[in-house]
Image (tube, rainbow, N blue to C red):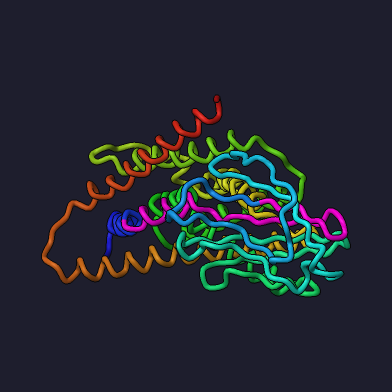
Amino acid sequence: MTSLPLIRFALALLMLLLHTSMAEAHRFAPSLLKLTQTAEATYNAVWKTPTEALSAIAMQPSWPAGCRMVAENPVLREGTGTVSSWTLDCGSLGEAGLVGEKLGVVGLAENQASAMVMLSLSDGRRYQSVVNAETPEFLVPAQPSQTRIMTEYSVLGTEHIWGGTDHLMFVLGLLLLVGGGRRLLWTITAFTVGHSVTLALVTLGLLSYPVALVEFAIALSIFILALELTRTHQVGSIQPVSLFKRHPWWLAGGFGLLHGMGFAGALADIGLPQSNVPLALLFFNIGIEVGQIAFVLLLLGGWWLFNQALAISAVTVNRRRLVLIPVYLLGGLSAMWCIERGIALVS
């Protein structure tokens, strides 16, 4: 029978292989182009994009040629991104304005990026669309579509969980702590319930929090989990089973509350359609769960392949020592995040 350390080692090995690409994806969150109608033919345009880029070709917003820039505000620095804003006069487009016109972003393919386009009209209509390398422009319809909201926010949720290395590292730590089976199901469910609660409360305006403090606490939660894993897997040590080991769902659910605030912060950066916040929130959360389940299944599938390969090979490994490698990696990364976010918190 396959030993539990082997399962944990296989899961950890897959995480090591995935870590580099995930870390890059986390830094390049979707950009945001937001246009708000302020008068009959006047719009305020705001463009938020990460400071770092994958290409020398900068991403730039695009709007109809019939819109001319009449004012430009100074570029602002906001966290790891920049914010540019303009006032547009679109009087030559006629009475319909931007309806029936295309909005988009240039340079998405070169930067392997996506962007959210949002449009708010003075009559209350709200539009949003994700543009990417395949579809860099959004054709503004006469009426917003609920189907588009469901599709695009579920995709955004999945993209966010797969781009959030810290969240996935916490899920990996839970897998290393509990192994597989029913305990894994209960633990992941507790994490899901925890982050779903705070994601909803923050998004609906029922809970506010200091962003920098929560980001530090998320890093600290991963460090605490790494310490528990170090204690559990220490070679040659005999220690009583801890409360976290006996009831990992309490650890997962409690720290899930923190991670939900992190998800809410990302959702706030993306923006929500004010005419249908609950629907967008629901499908963003569904997207997160789909991405999380896919990640767990990928790790378990990778473990199965690793187990099969090891079974037919003649290689002998000390699995109990090898499993400490990803545990220490988890601890090292989380400690680095604690230092970085701690400095940001006090500065």
Q: Residue at x 60, y 40 (%)?
A: 78
Q: Position of residue 156 (x, y in %)?
A: 59, 62
Residue 301 image-quadrant placement? bottom left
Left or right of 121 in this view: 48: left
Q: Residue furthest top?
A: 346
Q: Is residue 183 visible?
A: no
Q: Position of residue 108 (x, y in %)?
A: 51, 63
Q: Residue at x 29, y 70 (%)?
A: 305
Q: Nearer the viewer, residue 174 or 131?
A: 131
Q: Which residues are magenta?
A: 17-46
Q: Quadrant of the N terminus?
A: bottom left
Q: Nearer the viewer, residue 34 or 231?
A: 34
Q: Is residue 336 visible?
A: yes
Q: Nearer the viewer, residue 301 or 342?
A: 342
Q: Residue at x 23, y 49 (%)?
A: 322
Left or right of 21 in this view: 264: right
Left or right of 89 in this view: 110: left
Q: Residue furthest left?
A: 314
Q: Position of residue 90 (x, y in %)?
A: 78, 62
Q: Residue at x 75, y 55 (%)?
A: 88
Does 134 sit above or below residue 2?
below
Does 82 sit above or below residue 17?
above
Q: Quadrant of the C terminus?
A: top right
- Residue 98 magenta-drawn? no
Q: Position of residue 337 (x, y in %)?
A: 44, 37
Residue 36 image-quadrant placement? bottom right
- Residue 38 magenta-drawn? yes
Q: Nearer the viewer, residue 327 or 47?
A: 47
Tag count:
0
